[in-house]
Image: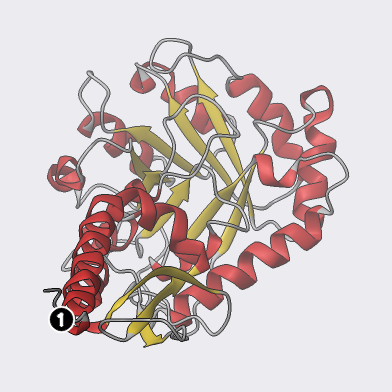
Amino acid sequence: MMAGRPARTSKPARYSPLVSASVLDCELSDMAREARRALRAGADRIHLDVMDGHFVPNISFGPRVIKSLRRVGKQPFDAHLMISEPGRYLSEFIDAGCDTISIHVEIEEPIEPTLLAIRKAGRLAGLAIKPATPLSALEPYRELIDIVMVMTVEPGFGGQKFMKEAASKILPAHKMFRDRSPDLAPGQVHVDGGVNRSSAELCGIMAADVLVVGSALWKKGRDVAREIRLIKALTVEGYWNGAGKGKGAIPHHEWATFAVLPRVIGKGLTAEMEAAGIPTIQIRAVRPDDWVGPRPYELLIPAGFEDGARERFGEALQRAETDAAEARREAAAAITPARD
């Protein structure tokens, strides 16, 4: 077993997601105070976005700032290096006190030497993956990583909208840590980008271990402690309502009507949506007195999935509504008396 590394233990039966507070969007003139505020409010770790203006179109801060910030507490510091040459500066980030160091799989320099150096220093090594990059890009490094960081926004700027399609990689990312050497530390899947109260439930459905939360914490007038508690609670709810394995939530409130269709026609659309992981229910709709044709059914989905479902299944919905309208016309024609 590698010296200085934690021994492998089984994952707890109770799902307890952690929040890593990103300080990228905090009041940077007093970053230490803001980091302490997040930790006092219940954040489990501090997330540090390092950007070089080359790998991503933005510049943030470097190891000297992190080393100065390290005195705020003993909670883990997660460094996310969005830089082109992490190997060149790695010793500085280790010296700065970073507990985990994640680099991007998309960089052009050799990845393996940097991962090995991180682990030799007794720190946890991670690979971050952009939204468009397939998980298969991580496969050559599965024995060398402790963290998979799934990016749900394009890296470079805070405050971006959560990308649900990218989030679909969170659950299968856990497979990277199966069948590995028992001497390795338990792997973690982090989700980074647009995580807030709206996206937390989906992160739980996908069984994310660590939620990187940034701009949602630093909005003016926001109670940081309440926000962290809310995000954690919604994540846990998503995990258990989704059977804890990303099988889709079984919500108990706030269902939205996605369509009103005859049951037979709605079944096809329901099957497509269920296959995509969106829970659906068909219930009888109120039938107007002048209704002609097959009985209408409401196709209900969780309200949180509605926007994404309309974007993804808009064309299928239009086809189903066209078929339903034709079925009504045929039924009306069948009961209309023929004219002489």
Residue 77 in which image quadrant: top right
Residue 24, image x, y percentages: 64, 31
Name the kind of residue labelled 1 in the image: Ala
Above/below status of 6 relative to 23 = below
**Camera sees residue 236:** yes
Q: How is the image coloured?
A: secondary structure
Q: Is 121 rendered above or below residue 59? A: below
Q: Where residue 214 sits in the image (x, y, percent)?
A: 63, 42
Residue drawn at x 66%, y 53% is: 75
- Residue at 59% over, 70% down: 234
Question: In this rendering, would 5 be left or right of 42?
Answer: left
On the image, the x and y values in percent for residue 8 come to 35, 70
Quarter of the N terminus within the rendering: bottom left
Q: Which residue occupies the foreground of this view, 172 or 326?
A: 326
Residue placed at 39% from the left, 50% from the top? Answer: 164
**Res 95 quadrant in image:** top right
| Rendered image quadrant of residue 30 | top right
Q: Residue furthest front?
A: 340
Residue of label 1: 334
Q: Specify whether 12 is left or right of 171.
A: right
Out of 184 and 81, give the one closest to the viewer: 81
